[in-house]
Amino acid sequence: MRRRLFLAGATTVPVAGRAQAAWPSRPIRAYVPVAPGSAADNLARVIIEPMGAALGQPIIIDNRAGAGGVIGAHAAARAAPDGYSLLIATAATQAGNVSLIRNLPYDPIRDFSPISRLVHFPQVLVVHPSVPARTAEEFVAWLRAHPGRNFASAVAGNFAPAALLAKRLGLDAQVVTYRSPPQALTDVIAGVVPFMFIDISVVLGHVRAGLVRALAVTSAAPSPLLPEVPALAATILPGFELLSWLALYAPAGLPAPMVTRLNTEARAALARPEIIARLLAMGFETQSSTPGELAEFTRAEIEKWRSLVAETGMEVT
């Protein structure tokens, strides 16, 4: 009897090993907390194919837009930590929302396993062609001559630079909130709202088509994709820089081997020359990391946004 029990116990080790080694054995869901055509969605559609190929299973995008990214991030936080759910997170979902949304239904630190940073990118100040300003300085003068004008916003990254601009320069402008950045941009193109700050990947084609006019970027230097558009730091907001970013997380409690594997494949995808070229063409600069580095970065960004919200008086909802 003792021999039979020993042999039975011994057989469980390779069975468990085989089960663990089999991951992933079915498609993986990647929650994207913004609408199709938004920056996180644009990025996801570039990196999920090589990651899925390396993992041996497709990664399926699940767009869960709304509430400044809260809906999608919350869905990912509630998912099982079994390696079949990921989050393509934004600066809003993991940092800005902590200070902007009362009773946030998830905790960006407690409820997620960090995997890797992915990219960062600037916001672009764009205006409808009917706005006569062709420089940031002329835009400020126009706003002062037309107080109370509306600006469009869908996520914290759109809202923050506009709020900071208004606060530091004493401008009077009112926010109109939209469900997604592409939806907000549609109204700017139509002239319903005269201006907004928006992710470069979302607006680049519209700028080149002349549907909106780009006046400034929120990076410290001009973007190589819009070299003629100056930085706010070089014009009306000396020293200012605010970059949006995207990163990969999973639900908290993901086993360490899965964290390591996902980190390895994400970083490998971001290192491929063709992927780098595609992302650069969209305005993204790759920025991979270890899980620990992403955890530290997330904490630092939460504090940065806390200070930004306090300075600007951005409304907490």
Image (cartoon, grey):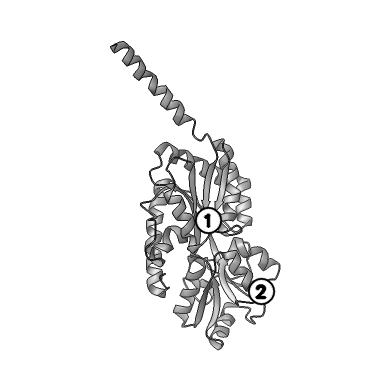
- The residue tagged 2 is 190
Q: Which residue is depicted at the point 42% across and 49% down?
A: 78
Q: Position of residue 168 (x, y in %)?
A: 45, 78
Q: Which residue is depicted at the point 49% across and 47% down?
A: 86
Image quarter where the N terminus lies is: top left
Is residue 262 placed above or below 197 in the rendered structure?
above
Instruction: Name which residue type carries label 2.
Output: Ala
C-beta proximity under 8 Å, tags 1 and 2: no
Image quarter where the C terminus lies is: bottom left
Q: Position of residue 282 (x, y in %)?
A: 62, 57
Q: Position of residue 277 (x, y in %)?
A: 63, 51
Q: Position of residue 264 (x, y in %)?
A: 49, 40
Q: Secondary structure at mark 2?
A: helix
Describe residue 305's horizontal placement relative to residue 129 as left or right: left
Residue 64: mark in rendering: 1
Q: Which residue is depicted at the point 52% across and 34% down?
A: 25
Q: How many marks?
A: 2
Outermost residue, front side = 1
Is residue 53 placed above or below 280 in the rendered structure?
above
Q: Secondary structure at mark 1?
A: loop
- Which badge, 1 or 2, comes first in the chain's sequence? 1
